């Protein structure tokens, strides 16, 4: 959800050398695939490309079983954590 309450649909495209985050048919962040793969293995400091920021999820969204949760934010979209399933799917797609 955006700060104004509108739904914010994000599409993640995994290509041979990059991972694109798209919104409203526009690329809002283009990450190097290998760099993102490594970062997702052990998320630590935030990384930002374009208007997309990925960071370790807030402690309230992490559990002892899943301390590796990742959150995404955009300028008008508050930080939100990927679900464990979505995060696992992303990691699997960029292997």
Image: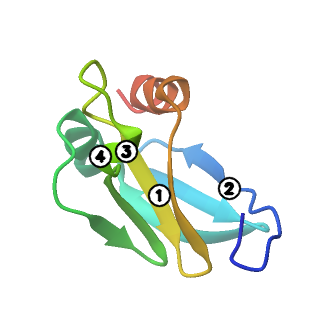
Q: Classify mark 4: residues with Cα within 10 Å, few (<14), some (14-19) or many (20+).
A: few
Q: Quadrant of residue 54?
A: bottom left
- The percent position of residue 45, horizontal first and vertical second, equals 17, 60
Q: Residue at x 72, y 63 (%)?
A: 1
Mark 4 or 2: the one toward you: 4
Mark 1 or 3: the one toward you: 3
Q: Residue at x 53, y 57 (%)?
A: 20
Is residue 62 found left or right of 81 in the rendered image?
left
Is residue 70 found left or right of 76 in the rendered image?
left
Q: Residue at x 27, y 34 (%)?
A: 68
Mark 3 to mark 2 CA distance (whole Å): 23 Å
Mark 4 to mark 1 CA distance (whole Å): 14 Å
- The percent position of residue 90, horizontal first and vertical second, equals 47, 33
- Toward the viewer: 31 or 23? 23
Which residue has dot 4 on it?
Answer: 59
Mark 4 or 1: the one toward you: 4
- Report the colour scheme: rainbow
- As drawn, 72 above or below 95: below
Which residue has dot 3 on it?
Answer: 60
- Toward the viewer: 13 or 83? 83
Q: Which mark is residue 10?
A: 2
- Secondary structure of the residue carrying tag 3 is helix
Quadrant containing the C terminus is top left
Callout 4 touching callout 3 (CB < 8 Å): yes
Mark 1 to mark 3 CA distance (whole Å): 15 Å
- Secondary structure of the residue carrying tag 1 is strand
Q: Which mark is residue 72?
A: 1
Q: Which mark is residue 46?
A: none
Mark 1 or mark 3, earlier in chain: 3
Mark 4 or mark 1, earlier in chain: 4
Q: Quadrant of residue 8?
A: bottom right
Mark 4 to mark 2 CA distance (whole Å): 23 Å
């Amino acid at each position: 959800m955006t700060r104004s309450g509108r739904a914010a649909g994000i599409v993640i495209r995994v290509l041979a050398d990059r991972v694109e985050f798209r919104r409203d048919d526009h690329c809002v962040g283009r990450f190097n695939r290998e760099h993102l793969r490594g970062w997702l293995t052990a998320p630590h400091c935030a990384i930002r490309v374009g208007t997309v920021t990925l960071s370790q999820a807030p402690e309230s969204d992490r559990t002892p079983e899943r301390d590796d949760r990742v959150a995404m934010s955009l300028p008008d979209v508050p930080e939100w954590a990927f679900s464990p399933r979505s995060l696992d799917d992303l990691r699997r797609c960029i292997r």
